[in-house]
Amino acid sequence: MNRSVRLDILATDSTGAKLNVEVQRSDKGAGRKRARYNSSMMDANLLIKGEDFDKLPETWVIFITENDVMGKGLPLYPIERCFLGTGERFEDGSHILYVNGAYRGDTPIGKLMHDFSCTDAADMYYGTLADRVRFFKESKEGIEIMCRAMEDMRNQTLKEGMINVAKKMLEDGTITLEKIAEFVGLSVDEVRKLKTDQNM
């Protein structure tokens, strides 16, 4: 079975460009081949069958990393394909950008990275961001939204764990679909689909 990817944030800007934003605390999670993979997965899902390749929109994979994973002390690392002989851009519409979350400086990006690391809205430079932090941390409505989001994330993680257990049981081949469903809390139909996917 092929590997899938779950994108942290997938957005569309005013020009129609698609943006995948990943926030990574671990350097390993922001590897160069991970950026390539995310970019390819976005492309694979942006056209319907038979649609012309020229319809592909501009795409951006943006990694905001806790550390300076490129190690050059720059705030931003834009990556573009180019012709090696001339340095001219290939202009295929795909872009990768690493944002150095450790960067601090008296620039808009330095201030934004500072704000991203703040736990107290009062210490932030940008009022709009500070207001949203206050809403989610201090207002009753915001706290309820965050609690629901955390509960959804916890449930999704638990379900993914149970799906992995079910796959192992299916590989074993000695346990009935009904028993697997009972043990992991999935429906028999969900387990049957997992089995079908494994056999593809």
Image (tube, grey):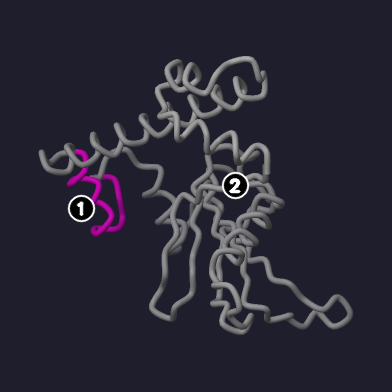
Rendered-image quadrant of the C terminus: top right
Which residue occupies 61% across, 47% down?
68
Region rendered in magenta: 123-137
- Quickly name the residue at label 2: 4
Q: At label 1, which amino acid type do we have?
A: Asp
Residue of label 1 = 131
Above or below for 14 versus 26: below
The image position of residue 27, as x and y in percent, is 63, 40
Tell me which residue sits at (68%, 57%) in the image: 36
Q: Is residue 53 above or below residue 120?
A: below
Q: Which amino acid lies under the numbered mark 2 shown in the image of this protein?
A: Ser
Number of residue marks: 2
User: Relative to residue 57, is residue 113 drawn left or right?
Assistant: left
User: What residue do we see at 53% from left, 43% from top?
Assistant: 24
Alpha carbons under labels 2 and 1: distance apart: 35 Å
Q: Is residue 133 magenta?
A: yes
Q: Residue furthest right?
A: 85
Residue placed most toward the observer, 172 or 70: 172
Asked which quadrant contains residue 84, the reply is: bottom right
Give the mark nearest the N terminus, 2 or 1.
2
